Amino acid sequence: MLRRKSLLLAVVLIISTLIPAAQIYAHDNCGFISLVNGWARASVEGMTNSAAYGLVVNMTGVEDALIGGSTDAAEAVEIHEMVMGAGDVMQMRPVEGGIVVPNNSFATLQPGGLHIMLINLTQPLIAGEMLNLTLTFREAGDVSISLPIMDAAEMESMGGMDMGGEGGMHMGDMATEEAMGGMDMGGEHADHMHGDMEIPEDCHHVFFLNAWVRPAGAGQPNSAAYGLMLNLTDEDVSLVGGSADFVEAVEIHEMVMGAGDVMQMRPIEGGLVIPAGGAVVLQRGGYHVMLIGLTSELAADSMVDLTLTLSDGHELVLTLPVQEPPMEGEGGMNMGG
């Protein structure tokens, strides 16, 4: 009996080494919670306040909330939002209870929406330098990070002012040469584009968070999958393709402005780069996983199996919900208002 158990254990160990790692960790609760693609707005003369932005990612296994923080560069750190007030005037106010982030999900902090408010600066925030910031979560407690300080005007010219809405570019695009717009990000600054984060060892993988597939009825030949591609490894990884038994082909596409200011869709040559320690949002009107040649209808509220292929040889083996596009402010894709 003891020998049989030993043989069985050996077989299990052998099989486990043959299974691509992504099949094991694709949806694990690895204990990570932090601000990804984060940056702080450089201050200008006479400015007493500033703000920090990014994607709050929660992979701790439980719902959590970003409730505040601290930094030596400001007297107070609060969580604020921009809302439409009386007379259609945008107003800023604190977020009661903080920014709630479900497990295996994310929230978008961006100018004009949710943000980390740095109140009464004690020192200037100079573009090209770093800001040490401690984030306080309701469950996880304090998380220390270091963010690049960036000029807001340069961020806007790079498309970085839109981090989660539909269309346009977002902070995740900053990893690509095209989105950089020729901006010089070399030297020490390039090493901190996504800040310094504590990443648990079990999280050193690539994940697809808040992923979902668009429904397709009779006569609709194609569909697409969206979500947040998160790379918590120390190497850039590209999303290069995939497969599924309900389509003829899986490709990685993007929407770009074509001739006559008409949006056009095209494959991304070489795949979509997911920067080390960073993330890229896949969304309608932007980057997406194109599901070409459907062999069956995709009914809302059903589930489908999808395998995504990465440039490092790993595969993400996923089971995703088919659902109608979330309303603005839902589903983690744009939680900024």
Image: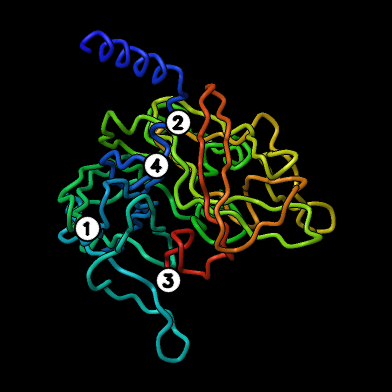
Please report whichever mark, 1 or 2, sits nearer to the chain's N-terminal start: 2
- Of the residues shown, which amino acid type is indicated by label 3? Gly
Q: Position of residue 97 (x, y in %)?
A: 22, 70
The label number, if any, that marks residue 121 in the structure image: 1
- Of the residues shown, which amino acid type is indicated by label 4? His
Question: Tag 3, which secondary structure?
Answer: loop
Please report whichever mark, 1 or 3, sits nearer to the chain's N-terminal start: 1
Residue in the foreground of this view, choosing between 298 and 287 = 298
Label 2, label 4: how far apart the Cα atoms are: 9 Å
Q: Looking at the image, do the residues carrying marks 3 and 2 touch, with CB atoms under 8 Å apart? A: no
Front position among marks 1 and 3? 3
Label 3, label 4: how far apart the Cα atoms are: 27 Å
Please report whichever mark, 2 or 4, sits nearer to the chain's N-terminal start: 2
Q: Position of residue 140 (x, y in %)?
A: 18, 50
- Of the residues shown, which amino acid type is indicated by label 1? Leu
Please report whichever mark, 3 or 4, sits nearer to the chain's N-terminal start: 4
Residue furthest toward the front?
Answer: 1
The label number, if any, that marks residue 27 in the structure image: 4
- Of the residues shown, which amino acid type is indicated by label 2? Ala
- The answer to which quarter of the image holds residue 289 is top right
Label 1, label 2: how far apart the Cα atoms are: 43 Å
Q: Is residue 320 above or below residue 197?
A: below
Question: Tag 2, which secondary structure?
Answer: helix
Residue hosting label 2: 22
Front position among marks 4 and 1? 4
Quick one: quadrant of the N terminus? top left
The label number, if any, that marks residue 337 in the structure image: 3
Label 3, label 2: how far apart the Cα atoms are: 33 Å
Residue furthest toward the right?
Answer: 260
